[in-house]
Amino acid sequence: MNCIAHRGFADAYPENTRTALRQAIGAGADGVEVDVRRCGSGEPVVIHDETVDRVTDRAGAVAALTRAELADCSVLGTGEGVPTLQEVCELLPADVRLHLELKEVGVAADAAALAAEYPFDLLVSSFDPDALRATAGGADVPLAYLFGSERQLPGVSRFRDGPGAALATARTLGCAALNPHWRHCDAAFVDRVHDAGLAVNAWTIRSQEAAEAVAAAGVDGLIADDPRFCAVGSAE
């Protein structure tokens, strides 16, 4: 089972920064998960939110800020700017898989094509089936469908799905993996997904209890916010 550093282990390091990714790799992560969207000057950049307000010393929509303006921000007091996807790809070694979460449809094809040029393994994921369809229309890369329930995704009803419907969607999209919220990962459902030929990566692991539960259920990867859970989730 693989341990995947969610935003570069967001509870331990400043999320979605180059520093976090370097630290996550050093801590033994088998893969790193980052979020990508398009900035105002057109480049794919690595940031979770639609705005920079929560994680930087500036305010404004990512889509309204240029690459240079984002580079001039300080993410969570680090002095580091918001990185481009290219900058993130350039620091990853070939033996660490990139889990690339698409936060919007419009960046999908370009982001996947860029990341696919690098030697590391790539898995492109999204809660939005349209983003995965846009990816499939471009680069030939493996896809993962993310899903969760109303409780796990409050306020984003468009992307809420039940386990059965989510598996059907993933199969229709030709996904290589299904990424459920960890509370959906009982052994019966994990077996069902495996029987359909898909891998299972559980998100987001924030406790030892959750790590042990998904390990017992037989998931292929856990997407964690802290490197402490790599002891449970490291590849065997």
Image (spheres, rainbow, N blue to C red):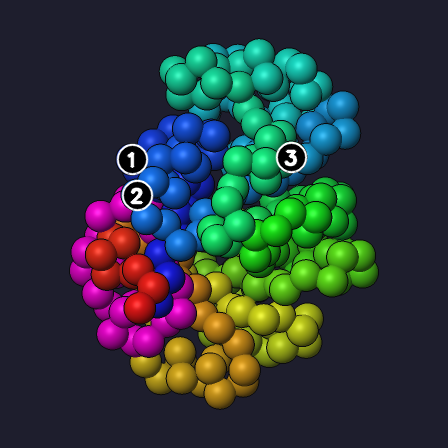
1 or 3: mark nearer the eye: 3
In what quadrant of the picture does the N terminus appear?
bottom left
> Which amino acid type is marked by label 2?
Ala
SS class of the residue under badge 2?
loop
- Whether residue 171 is visible to the viewer of this picture, yes or no, is yes
Pointer 3: what residue? 86
Q: Nearer the viewer, residue 23 or 188?
A: 23
Give the magenta part as a residue range.
207-228
Q: Nearer the viewer, residue 205 or 93?
A: 93
Asked if the residues shown at circle 2 and circle 1 are in contact, with their CB atoms under 8 angstroms apart, the answer is yes
Pointer 2: what residue? 27
- How would you rate the neighbour count of disc 3 (Cα within 10 Å): few for under 14, some for 14-19, many for 20 or more? some
Location of residue 111 by image quarter = top right
In what quadrant of the picture does the C terminus appear?
bottom left
**Tag count:** 3
SS class of the residue under badge 3?
helix
